Image (tube, rainbow, N blue to C red):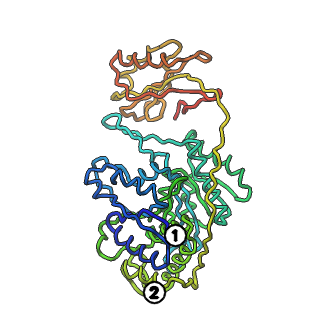
């Protein structure tokens, strides 16, 4: 029985590397029923803001996987990333990127590197919730949820268990983002206790990134929020040898998408130069996912054998190591000719039919009492502070009174410092007296007071305590 998959050739070098990939898959005997769709630049330009016809969703939904070549998002015009749209719309919460050294056939300073980056795929700054608040100030909202964090952390540990990996490492920045990254770290620690057969540790992302670039051999499976994972999986792929060699899986409970991690490279399009390896290795991940591990193993080992033989595309060709520089089509034919062969120097791969990641019910966090205690009002006003302070200092509604003003997170009143550089967005914090109830109507009246004196309110944030602890950043941040 053939497995139905959706196929998109994409833009730039996409059609060339897709044709090369499909040639190899067919030669390997992969049982695939192809359902081609058009996505990307031409669809954007035809007036589809998501980069694809809405009817394409039904094709993707009715197949077992989506094999997608890179696409081009037109510059300007407010076009949203199609990759992000597909991942979030279909709930593809786990992005999996193996970053492996193929030394000495592909040049690298880290010949023993074998790292898998598992990246949260739906939340963080990639939710795309942005605002231009003033002529010179923009804002992006970073969203981290307990549910999203638990799904990706659990996936990372299950991946490690199924693939014989020994350790899962968390990268985060909770020394600064104590609530968002702090929640991700808390969930990691909770889930890790359930996997006593897998080691775990955690690093602040900046020093972790430095160690990844310098000593990647100390890492095995990395898990991290969306933005860090996007950046560092590219870094990991490049230091392993080349971004052009890395494939990517996007996996959810109800579907999966497979792709190369690189872009559409329009400057190389139509020249028979592009390396199809990233998309091909993404297709190998797809074959394992849809239950065709034998075909995946055959393709992957043939690809390794081709690397060993020194048949290389221009991007990894190196005098003294490579034997022949070939184009996209020729490389695909070389891999196809090696189907059934094992690599002799590189370690052969073995795939088996892995059980699906169990859909363990998400844990239920204990109830925490939630209490409204104040409001932060953000206003647009040119500096300095003295130009508007006298107009708002008197505002008091019930027990609510002005307690603090900050600029870019730095307190400027009370006890501000003259050296602090200020911009045109200010945060004015109103808090109720300790032990005094604050109502939604009180907050509305505060906003009404700003309107009464013609102050330009950009936004507001309600302040809550959870189990008696502040659910908002302190006076300094």
The image shows residue 293, relative to residue 212, as above or below, that is below
Seen as rendered, the residue at the extreme front is: 1
Seen as rendered, the residue at the extreme top is: 398
- Does dot 2 land on a helix, a strand or a loop? loop
Instruction: Please report the residue visible at 61 percent of the width from the left and 18 percent of the height from the top.
Output: 434
- Of tags 2 and 1, the one toward the viewer is 1
Per the rendering, the mark at residue 1 is 1
Tell me how many marks there are. 2
Near mark 2 (Cα within 10 A), the count class, few <14, some 14-19 or many ≥20, is few
User: Left or right of 451: which side holds 411?
Assistant: right
Q: Position of residue 437 (x, y in %)?
A: 58, 16
- Does dot 1 land on a helix, a strand or a loop? loop
Q: Position of residue 57 (x, y in %)?
A: 40, 53
Residue 139, by quadrant, is top left
Q: Earlier along the polypeptide chain: callout 2 or callout 1?
A: 1
Q: Position of residue 222 (x, y in %)?
A: 59, 58
Instruction: Please report the residue visible at 45 percent of the width from the left and 54 percent of the height from the top.
Output: 61
Q: Position of residue 345 (x, y in %)?
A: 58, 83
Near mark 1 (Cα within 10 A), the count class, few <14, some 14-19 or many ≥20, is few
Instruction: Please report the residue visible at 36 percent of the width from the left and 52 percent of the height from the top.
Output: 55
Closest to the observer, 392 or 236: 236
Per the rendering, the mark at residue 238 is none
Q: Are marks 2 and 1 in contact (CB under 8 Å)?
A: no
Residue 364, by quadrant, is top right
User: Left or right of 256: which side holds 41?
Assistant: left
The image shows residue 429, relative to residue 366, as above or below, that is above
Per the rendering, the mark at residue 320 is 2
Seen as rendered, the residue at the extreme right is: 196
The image shows residue 139, relative to residue 220, as above or below, that is above
Instruction: Please report the residue visible at 52 percent of the width from the left and 17 percent of the height from the top.
Output: 439
Closest to the observer, 6 or 386: 6
């Amino acid at each position: 029985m053939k497995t139905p998959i959706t196929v998109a050739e994409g833009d730039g070098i996409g059609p060339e590397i897709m044709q090369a990939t499909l040639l190899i898959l067919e030669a390997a005997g992969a049982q695939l029923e192809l359902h081609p769709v058009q996505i990307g630049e031409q669809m954007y330009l035809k007036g589809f803001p998501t980069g694809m016809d809405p009817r394409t969703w039904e094709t993707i939904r009715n197949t077992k996987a989506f094999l997608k070549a890179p696409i081009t998002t037109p510059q300007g015009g407010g076009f949203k990333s199609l990759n992000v749209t597909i991942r979030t719309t279909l709930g593809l919460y786990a992005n999996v990127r193996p970053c492996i050294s193929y030394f000495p056939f592909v040049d690298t300073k880290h010949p023993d590197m074998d790292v898998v980056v598992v990246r949260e795929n739906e939340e963080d700054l990639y939710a795309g919730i942005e605002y231009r608040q003033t002529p010179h100030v923009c804002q992006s909202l970073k969203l981290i949820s307990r549910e999203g964090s638990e799904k990706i952390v659990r996936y990372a540990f299950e991946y490690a268990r199924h693939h014989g990996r020994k350790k899962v490492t968390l990268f985060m920045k909770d020394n600064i983002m104590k609530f968002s990254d702090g929640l991700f770290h808390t969930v990691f620690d909770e889930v890790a206790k359930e996997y006593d057969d897998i080691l775990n540790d955690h690093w602040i992302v900046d020093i972790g990134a430095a160690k990844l670039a310098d000593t990647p051999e100390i890492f095995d499976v990395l898990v991290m929020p969306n933005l860090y994972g996007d950046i560092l999986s590219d870094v990991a792929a490049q230091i392993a040898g080349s971004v052009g060699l890395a494939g990517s899986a996007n996996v959810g409970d109800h579907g999966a998408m497979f792709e190369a991690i690189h872009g559409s490279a329009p400057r190389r399009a139509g020249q028979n130069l592009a390396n199809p390896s990233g998309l091909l290795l993404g297709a190998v991940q797809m074959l394992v996912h849809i239950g065709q591990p034998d075909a995946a193993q055959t393709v992957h080992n043939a690809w390794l054998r081709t690397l060993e033989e020194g048949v290389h595309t221009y991007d990894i060709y190196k005098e003294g190591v490579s034997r022949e520089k070939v184009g996209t089509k020729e490389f695909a034919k070389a891999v196809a000719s090696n189907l059934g062969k094992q690599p002799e120097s590189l370690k052969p791969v073995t795939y088996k039919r892995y059980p699906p990641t169990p859909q363990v019910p998400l844990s239920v966090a204990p109830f925490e009492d939630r209490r409204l205690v104040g409001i932060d009002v953000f206003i647009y006003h040119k500096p300095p502070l003295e130009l508007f302070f006298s107009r708002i200092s008197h505002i008091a509604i019930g027990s609510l009174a002005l307690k603090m003003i900050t600029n870019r997170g730095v307190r400027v009143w009370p006890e501000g410092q003259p050296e602090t550089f200020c911009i045109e967005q200010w945060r004015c914090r109103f808090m109720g007296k300790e032990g005094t109830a604050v109502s939604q109507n009180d907050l509305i009246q505060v906003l009404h007071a700003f309107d009464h004196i013609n102050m330009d309110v950009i936004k507001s944030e309600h302040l809550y305590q959870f189990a008696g602890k502040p659910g908002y950043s302190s006076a300094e941040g």
